[in-house]
Amino acid sequence: MAFFKRKKPAYTDISQIELPSHIGIIMDGNGRWAKKRGLPRSAGHTAGAQTFRKIARYCSDIGVRHLTVYAFSTENWRRPETEVSAIMKLFKEYLEEAIRDFKDDSIVLKFIGDRSAFSPELLALMEENEEESKDREGMVLNIAMNYGGRAELVRAMQSIARDAKDEKLDIEKIDEGLISDYLYTKGQPDPDLIIRPSGEHRTSNFLLWQSAYSEYVIMDVLWPDFREEHLNQALIEYANRNRRFGGV
Ligand code: IPE
Ligand code: IPE
Ligand code: MG
């Protein structure tokens, strides 16, 4: 059997590459990071939240236009109450800090997912952050909270059906572009690159529709240990891939 020869990587440094316009990150491995240290899982989430701040800032600094981070999935409610409330507390801290400290920031904050499950306090902070940042011109940071790709598609289908029933939409006009416009990521490009730290080879319900042609880079590092160098490594791996989109 003949094996394809792996081409020698053309790129070895991020200064040589064209950046992906949209990066997705599945911020995974917080629990294992804590376990390895004999700490409660919540300590892993605290460390992971610090990594998130650093990596989001780094992406914005190097000129990434869209970053989507998977922070909490529709399935993560299955976790013990203590863990879920520790995560909610971290969200609240981050959102308060974002409002307070980032007045002159350029990052546009958006939240994707089903908000109806969050406390009124958290909801108000999400809305305030979106409102405050909406006219900025920097990177769009989508934070996926209570997000699930399937739930997003269910919601889109319900809205499409409702609009068709109300005669706001002609069924013949339903195409891929229209479906994209009913998703939380409306108006944003599909992710070019999705990074999953912690070594798991699955999507776990992240951006199902949008990731049809995304390049996945799976990395063995746990999210709290993820550094700028890991992001650079993923960018270089991405730049050395050959995207064909079904062509030749
Ligand atoms: C990701 O880390 C954070 C969330 C899903 C909220 P995990 O908590 O899933 O960490 P592992 O996968 O158990 O190590
Ligand atoms: C995906 O990680 C969700 C987030 C990182 C927010 P999970 O840890 O929930 O995924 P599974 O359970 O390993 O598939
Ligand atoms: Mg996990």
Image: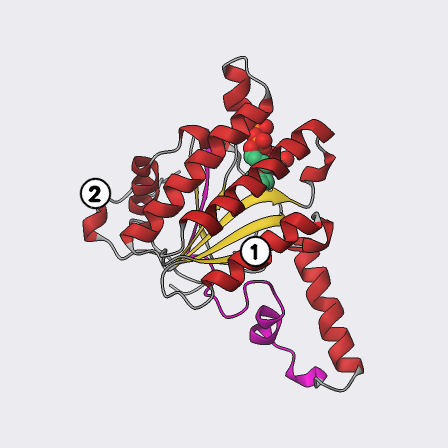
Residue 142 lies within the magenta run:
no
Answer with mark 2 or mark 1, whichever residue precedes in sequence: 2
Placement of 97 over or under 48, stated as above or below? below
Frontmost of labels 2 and 1 is 1
76 vs 220, nearest the viewer = 76
SS of the residue under disc 1: strand
User: Which range of residues does the magenta coloring cover?
Assistant: 171-197
Residue at 54% across / 12% down in the picture?
38
Q: Left of 245 or right of it: where is 200?
A: right
Residue extending farthest top: 38
Q: Which residue is mark 1?
A: 111
Residue at 77% across / 75% down in the picture?
162
Where residue 225 appears, as percent x and y from the top left, is 40, 28
Q: Which residue is mark 2?
A: 12
Residue at 57% across / 69% down in the picture?
180
Q: Quadrant of residue 189?
A: bottom left
